[in-house]
Image (cartoon, rainbow, N blue to C red):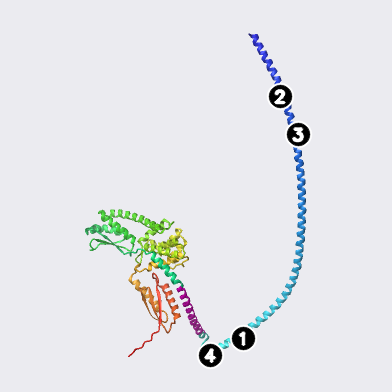
Amino acid sequence: MFLELGIGVAAAAITGAAGFAIAKKLDAANYEIYTTQAKARAKAIEHEAELVLKNVNINVQEAELAAKRRFEEESLKLKKEYVIKLTDVEKREISLKEDFKKLSSDKEEIEEFKKKTEELNQEAAKLKQDYQAKLKEAIRVLEHSAGLTECEAKEIILKKVEEQSRAEIAHVVRKYEEEAKQDAKRRANYILAQATTRFAGDFAAERLINVVNIKDDDLKGRIIGKEGRNIKTLEMLLGVDIIIDDTPNAIILSSFNLYRRAVATKVIQLLIEDGRIQPARIEDIHEKVKEEFEQSLIEEGENIVMDLGLTKIHPEIIKLIGKLKFRASYGQNALGHSLEVANLAGIIAAELGGNEQLAKRAGLLHDIGKALTQEFSGSHVDLGADVCKRYKEHAVVINAIYAHHGHEEAASIEAAAVCAADTLSAARPGARREVLESFLKRVQDIEDIAKSKEGIKQAYAINAGREIRVIANAKLVNDDEAVLLAKEISKEIEAKVQYPGEIKVNVIRETRAVDYAR
C-alpha cells in the first residue's frame, strides 16, 4: 500500500513539473508576441506624429503668408489715407490763412464803427439833455397856463384813461361772457338734469332730541333712582341730557352729538325692557351697546362701499364712513349727503368722460373729516385730507376734499364733479336748516356789500338769500359797467360771506320817466 502511495506521489510530482515547464514556455512565447506588437504600434505612432508635424509646419507657413499679405494691404491702405488727410490739412491751412486775413480786415472796420458809435452816443446824450430841458420848460408853461401842477394833470389823465379802459374792458367781457353762456348753458343743463333725475336720495332732517316711549310713568321714578343715582350715572356715561318732565309716557334725550344720542336711546330702551335699573346694570348695558354700535358702524360702511361698487378702502376709513351716519351739518345728515354727492358726482363725471368710480369714491370721502371733528380739533377738510393721505387714498380724492371748500383748484374732471355735486346736495330745498340769527346776518352782509359800491341806489336780498337784486343809478352806470359791477359784488361775497350753494347777483339799470294826466 505504501508502495502504491509513493508511486502516486511521484507521478503527481512529475506531472506538475511537466505542467510548469510547459506554462513557462507559453509565457515566454506570449511575451515575445506582445513585445513585437508594442514595437509595431510605436512605429505607427511615430509615423503619425511625423505627418502631424509636417501638416503643422505647412499650416504655419500658410498663416505667415496670409499675415504678411494682410499687413501689406493694411499698410497700403493707411498710406492712401495719410496722403488724403495730408492734402486736406494743407487745404484747410490755406483756408485759415485767408480767413485770418479777412478777420484782420474786419477788425479794422469794427474799430472804425466803434469810434462812430461813441460819437453818436455822445451826440444822443446831448440831444437828450436838450430834450429834457425843453420838456421841463414846456411843462412849466402848461402849468402856468392851466393852473395845474404836473402831478394833478397826470392824475386827471390817468383817471380818464382808466374810465375809457374800464368801458372797453366791460364791453369785451360782456361780449365773451354772453358767447360762453350760450355755448355752455345747454350742455350744463343737460348734465345737471341727467344727474338730478337719475338719482334722488332719501332725506330725513336730524333733530336735536330723541324721545323714548314708556308704557308707565312709574318707570320715570325708577330711571331717576334713589337720590337721583340712576339718572346721574346715565348722564355721566351717556354724555346726554335726560329730560324727565310732565310729558306723558315719554322720556326726552337731548344732545348735539347724534352718536351719543343714539347709544343713549338704545341703552334706556334695553334698561326698560330688562327692568333692572341700577348703576352696575347701567354700566354693563352701556358697554354692550357700545360694542354693538362699533360693529354696526363697520357693517354700515361695508354695505355702503359694496353698494357703490368701490374696492380697496382701508378698514379704518370704512368705519369712519359708518360713523358719518351720526353726524349732521345744518341739519343735513352727513352720510346721506355723502351718498348724494357720490352718486351725483359719478353721473356728472360719466357724462363728461371722466372716471365714474373714482368720482364716486371722491364724493363719498369728500366730507370724511366730519366723522373726526368731535374727537379732534381742526377743520373737517384738513382732518379728512390727513386721514386719506395716511391710508394712501388716490390723489384725486385728496384734491376733491380740498377743492369742495375752495382750498385748492379742482385738478380733474372727477374733483370738479364732486364740487358741483356737493353744491347740488347742499342747495337742494329742505336739505339744510340754519339758525335764524345766522341766516339774517348773512342776508344783511350780502346787502351791505352791494350797497357799498358806487352808483348803487338800493339792494334787496330775495329768494331766501339765494339772490340779491341790485338797483343801479342809470346816470352813473352804463350797461357794460353793470356787468363788471355784478362781477365785483359776486367776488366780494365769495371772499367775505359763508353760504351753501350759490348766490345770484342781479344788477338792474333802468331809466324811468314819470308824468301825471290831470
Q: Residue 281: in sight, yes or no?
A: yes
Disc 4 residue type (three-letter): His
Q: Give the x, y percent position of residue 343.
A: 40, 63
Label 2 packing within 10 angstroms: few (<14), some (14-19), many (20+):
few
Disc 2 residue type (three-letter): Asp
The count of marks equals: 4
Q: Is the magenta stretch mostly helix, strand or loop?
A: helix
Disc 3 residue type (three-letter): Lys
Of label 3 and label 4, which has the lower sequence position?
A: 3
Q: Give the x, y percent position of residue 132.
A: 59, 85
The question of residue 71 being in magenta is answered with no
Distance, label 2 to label 1, CA atoms, is: 141 Å
Secondary structure of residue under mark 4:
helix
Q: Mark 4 points at which residue?
A: 144
Disc sitting over residue 27 in the figure: 2
Q: Which of 318 and 371 is in front in this view?
A: 318
Residue at 66%, 11% (x, y): give it.
6
Of label 2 and label 3, which has the lower sequence position?
A: 2
Q: Nearer the viewer, residue 244 or 66?
A: 66
Disc sitting over residue 43 in the figure: 3
Disc 1 residue type (three-letter): Asp
Magenta region: 154-182
Q: Give the x, y percent position of residue 412.
A: 47, 65
Disc sitting over residue 130 in the figure: 1
Quarter of the image holding residue 32?
top right
Secondary structure of residue under mark 1:
helix
Of label 1 and label 4, which has the lower sequence position?
A: 1
Of label 2 and label 1, which has the lower sequence position?
A: 2
Taking 239 as reference, is 58 left or right?
A: right
Q: Which of marks 2 and 4 is in front?
A: 2
